[in-house]
C-alpha cells in the first residue's frame, strides 16, 4: 500500500483522538489501532515496538492522574479530568505505535519534496528509534542471560539501559557515516521510482478522511458529547454513529493485510 495512505490514516486517527475526551470513543479508537496492528504490521523489529508505546501510554495515564493529587483541592472531578487527559495521550501513543509498525520510514522519506528532505529524514529516523531500541534491548538481555546476569529487578535496570543506549549511539554514528558517504547535505540525492496509488490506498485514505470529517462536524454541531463534562461530573453520552464511523479506520485490515508471520 502507498505510504501516503498510511500517513493520512495516522493523521486522521490522531486528530480524532485529539478532538475528544470521551472514553468510549478513545477506547474504540485504541481497539481499531490494535486491530490494524494485528492485521497489517510488517514483519521485523517494528512488530514488537507497539508494546513500548502501550507501556508508555499506561504510564502516561497513571502519571497524569497522579498529578491531580499534588494540587490542594483534590476532587472526583479533577481526578476524572486527569484520567481522561491521560487516556487521550495514551490513545495517541497507541495510534503512533501502530503507524510505526505498519509504515516504512524509508518509503515515507521518498515521498518528501526536496526542500523538506532534511525534516523528513529526521521524522524517518524518529520512526525507526523504537524498533531499533526494542531489538537492542532484546540482544542485550540475551547476552546478559548467557553471562548469568539477570535484570528482572529494578536495581539491575541500569545494567540493561547503559548497553542499550550505547548500542543506539553506535547505530546513530553508523547511520551518520552512511549518510556522509552518500553525499547527503551536499546537493546530491538519489532519484526513486514513484510509488503508485492503488485502489486499496485510495480506500484507506477515503475511510480516514471520512472518519475525521464526521468527528469534525460532530464537534461543530455539539453531537455525541465529544468533550466530557467533569465540572459537574456527569456520565458521558455516546453516539452509535460516531463509534460506527471509527470502523472506517479499519479499512487497512481488508485491503492490506500483512503476510503470515
Image: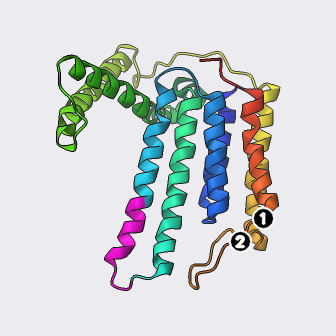
Identify the mark nearer the N-term, 1 or 2: 2
Q: Are marks 1 and 2 in contact (CB under 8 Å)?
A: yes
Q: Foreground residue, 48 or 89?
A: 48
Quadrant (top left, top right, bottom left, bottom right) of the N terminus: top right
Residue drawn at (21%, 29%) of the image: 150
Q: Is residue 97 left or right of residue 73?
A: right
Q: Does dot 1 land on a helix, a strand or a loop?
A: loop
Give the labeled residue for mark 1.
239
Other residues around mark 1 within 10 Å, as few (<14) / some (14–19) / many (≥20)? some
Give the labeled residue for mark 2.
225
Task: Inspect this view and state whether residue 213 appears.
Answer: no
Q: Does dot 2 land on a helix, a strand or a loop?
A: loop
Looking at the rendering, the stretch of residues picked out in magenta corresponds to: 62-73
Number of numbered discs visible in the structure rendering: 2
Q: Where does residue 124 sit, x and y in percent of width and height?
A: 48, 32
Q: Where does residue 20 sit, x and y in percent of width and height?
A: 63, 64
What kind of colouring is applied to the model shown? Answer: rainbow
Q: Decide whether the magenta segment is chiefly helix, strand or loop.
A: helix
Q: Quadrant of residue 164?
A: top left
Quadrant (top left, top right, bottom left, bottom right) of the C terminus: top right
Amino acid at each position: 500500500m502507498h505510504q501516503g495512505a498510511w500517513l493520512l490514516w495516522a493523521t486522521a486517527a490522531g486528530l480524532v483522538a485529539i478532538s475528544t475526551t470521551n472514553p468510549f470513543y478513545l477506547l474504540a479508537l485504541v481497539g481499531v489501532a490494535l486491530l490494524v496492528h494485528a492485521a497489517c504490521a510488517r514483519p521485523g523489529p517494528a512488530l514488537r515496538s507497539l508494546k513500548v508505546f502501550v507501556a508508555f501510554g499506561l504510564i502516561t495515564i497513571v502519571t497524569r492522574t497522579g498529578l491531580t493529587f499534588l494540587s490542594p483541592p483534590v476532587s472526583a472531578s479533577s481526578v476524572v479530568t486527569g484520567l481522561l487527559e491521560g487516556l487521550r495521550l495514551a490513545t495517541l501513543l497507541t495510534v503512533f505505535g501502530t503507524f510505526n509498525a505498519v509504515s516504512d520510514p524509508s518509503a515515507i522519506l521518498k515521498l518528501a519534496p526536496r526542500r523538506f528532505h532534511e525534516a523528513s529524514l529526521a521524522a524517518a529516523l524518529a520512526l525507526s528509534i523504537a524498533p531499533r531500541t526494542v531489538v537492542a534491548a532484546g540482544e542485550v538481555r540475551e547476552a546478559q542471560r548467557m553471562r548469568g546476569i539477570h535484570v528482572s529487578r529494578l536495581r539491575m535496570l541500569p545494567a540493561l539501559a547503559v548497553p542499550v543506549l550505547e548500542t543506539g549511539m553506535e547505530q546513530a554514528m553508523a547511520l551518520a557515516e552512511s549518510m556522509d558517504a552518500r553525499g547527503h547535505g551536499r546537493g546530491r540525492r538519489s532519484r526513486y521510482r514513484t510509488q503508485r496509488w492503488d485502489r486499496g490506498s485510495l480506500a484507506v485514505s477515503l475511510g480516514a478522511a471520512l472518519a475525521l470529517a464526521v468527528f469534525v462536524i460532530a464537534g461543530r454541531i455539539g453531537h455525541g458529547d465529544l468533550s466530557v463534562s467533569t465540572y459537574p461530573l456527569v456520565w458521558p453520552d455516546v453516539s452509535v454513529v460516531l463509534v460506527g464511523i471509527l470502523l472506517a479506520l479499519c479499512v487497512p485490515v481488508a485491503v492490506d493485510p500483512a503476510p503470515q508471520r
